[in-house]
Image (cartoon, rainbow, N blue to C red):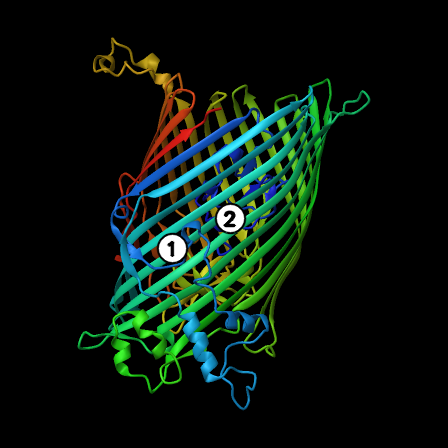
Amino acid sequence: MFVRGLGERYSSVLFNGAQIPSPDPTRRVVPLDLFPTSILQGVVVQKTFSPEMPGEFGGGTIQLRTVGVPEAPFLKISVGGTVIDGTTFADGLDLDGGGRDFTGFDDGTRAEPEVLRELREAGRFLRARGPFTPDGLSAGEIEAVGEALLSRSLDIGRSRNAPNGSLGLSGGYRLNLGEQWSIGLIAAMRYGNGRDNRDEIRRTFRSSDAGLALRGQTELQRSIREYDLSGYAAFGIEYGDLHTVRFGRTLVRQTEEELRITTGEVDSQVLERNLIEWIENDLKVSQSSGEHRIPLPFASPLQPLELDWHYTQAAAGRYAPGGSDLRFDFNEAGERVFSAAADGNLFRFEDLSDDSRNWEAHLRIPVAFDNGLSASLGLVKGAVDRERDSFIRRFSFVASRFLDPAVLRLPTPGLIFADENIGPRGFVLTEQTARTDTYFAEQALDYRAVTLDLNLFDRVRLVGGLREEDNLQNVVTFSVINPNDPPLVATIDEVDRLPSAAATWWITGNQQLRLGYSETLSRPDFRELTPAQFVDPLLDQLAFGNPNLRQTRITNYDARWEYYFSPTESLSLALFRKEFDDPIEKQLTPGSGDPIITVANAEGAINQGVEFDLFKSLSFLDRWIDQDSWLGRIGLAAPDWSNFSIGANYAWIDSEVRLDPEQSGINTNLIRPLEGQSRYVVNLQLGYQDPEGINQFTLLYNTSGARISQVGVDGAPDILEQPFGQLDLGYRRQFGDDWRVSLRLRNLLDPKSEFTQGSETVREFRKGREIGLTVEWSPF
């Protein structure tokens, strides 16, 4: 979720107040759609910083809060299916994988061979035995390892795609023990799998005296199969409204298999590339938490003390076994020939684990006086400890001079890499692991905060405070190829004091004005502090980090006017400005082929704009439209307009980032908008719900302005993602007390997704329309 158009760098998610890593450690996202809705007590988006929140705050923070003890027993079972235009019932790329791929767990088919695992655990790499490497492997041993590595299928085929499916189950039980005590259990799980075909055209250009010159054009056929699994279980204890204690465990898994065939011409060479990837991302969370109201045993202006606490352990992982990238070239005779060069084939094994512990205690001391004054003093203390281990192993096969050239012309990778073609007189396995492909990282963050909340005669509220964060991050990148190489250490050791102040003036009983000021941070992620290379998941381009990154300091100014038509209807207008010192931006550096993405601190940036929000029932139309009016005569008086509602959100944003000329690399523009920042964001909603709650319709439309997807280099313009307008329709119908059917129509307009560079189009594809149907049974 992007808040005010800012990207995922400036958004964060709290899970019951805890900071948790992403199940995809390559990105700063937590997939909200994987959490069963039945376990969520609420989802709140906070756009203004307060000292109780983590200091890493940019656009906003999304707070997920789960149910502890359910109000009443319940059981829900849901089954769903989705049809995607261009995917479902169409042929897609397919691969003969493991026997339990449908679970999202690899059964070992793609795992690195045992010999390679033993070498890695011993701190050694694959090399041939020789006079100076007596601990190396013999030619026969290397041949056996190569055959083991190729013991799985590399032949991409085609098969007919079935509809996507999902299954959900949730239930809870509450047991009252006397008048005060209650205990409860709640559990939920969700499983989903599906496919998505996407055909895409890509073009690359280089800058020339005559403008942009075409460097290459390729067509991508891509099929992605996803397996999602999530589960939640919690036990809670309540004592009246004074004490609540919860114990919960959460599992979120996302597995993605990507198959891709790329054909076209690049730098006057006609080629084909076959890509296979299997990636398992998971997140496990164990949490204990409590909420306590502690009445005082004596009469005093002091109100009951409020104490909230939690202890959270989280483990995120990324397991990507058996990735491969194979290249075929077409010669002048039009023959398809396997590229025998070392960079013509690459096999990867990746593993990453990210463990964190977060504890926090929050004490509030409220005071109320008879004269209409009240106050609350808040004290927060907590800590976050994280550790990450990451390694990548890369291998390729080099053709010996004895290899029969006819082998390179065989039609499939399975035939080319047959066992009889592996060995000293055929393909020889070599290690391509870079010296920066392994790193260890840790973070120790201690924080404390104090807040004061004053309520003056129910007309003015003043809130201020200070948060202090003592942060130490170390990322150690070391070589498994040559243990004698000195490790590269990146360190951030900072103590930051983050003030915050806000004032609210209730102008009348139904309108108020809010003003806010705060200072916050954005820190580099572990991966951004290591030179280890990886593929950027959004741009599909090689990237590496920068050990010299500094954290970003953000100064936030907010003003917001709110008017409430009713407790559920509101209108608001907000002004905001954010000033960034040392913002972290993606930049490009020269590579052996395409430029490579890296990150660097810019000199500074600003992000400012206006935001408009509206949610309103259309009941006022009943007063304007009657049977006697011309609108009534054409039938518009028939509906009960109080059943309809509209929602709108519009933000206009002006942003600018200034790059350091000495750190700008080969970037074209030293002054430009923030990467990923749109000029405007629009969200519209039209809803209908009948008085009995049997039928409910929701029509949604959202779009945003052009934004920089990739910065231009060597005089070429920036690459812009053009506006994409999405229209969705949802319908839900209740059948009796037990059954509910939901219909979802997504991307009804199906516009073309387009990326442009100057007047040229560099990427274009369509996402496809979707139709989803879910049936839910709730017997109680």
What residue is drawn where x is 56% and y is 35%? Answer: 66
Q: Amino acid at mark 1?
A: Ser
Q: What residue would you read off at disc 2?
A: 10
The residue drawn where x is 44% and y is 77% is: 144
The N terminus appears in which quarter of the rendering? top left
User: In terms of secondary structure, where does tag 1 sit?
Assistant: strand
Residue 709's mark?
1
| Residue 31 located left or right of residue 94 | right
Tell which circle, 2 or 1, labels the residue nearer the N-terminal end. 2
Q: Residue at 56% of width from left, 58% of height from top? A: 353
What percent of the width, then of the height, locates residue 20? 57, 47
Q: Are marks 2 and 1 in contact (CB under 8 Å)?
A: no
Identity, as a three-letter code, of the amino acid under mark 2: Tyr
Residue 589's x, y, as percent? 43, 68
Residue 483, by quadrant, is: bottom right
For label 2, the crowd category at 10 Å Cα-Cα, with few meaning under 14, some 14 to 19 and many 20 or more, is some
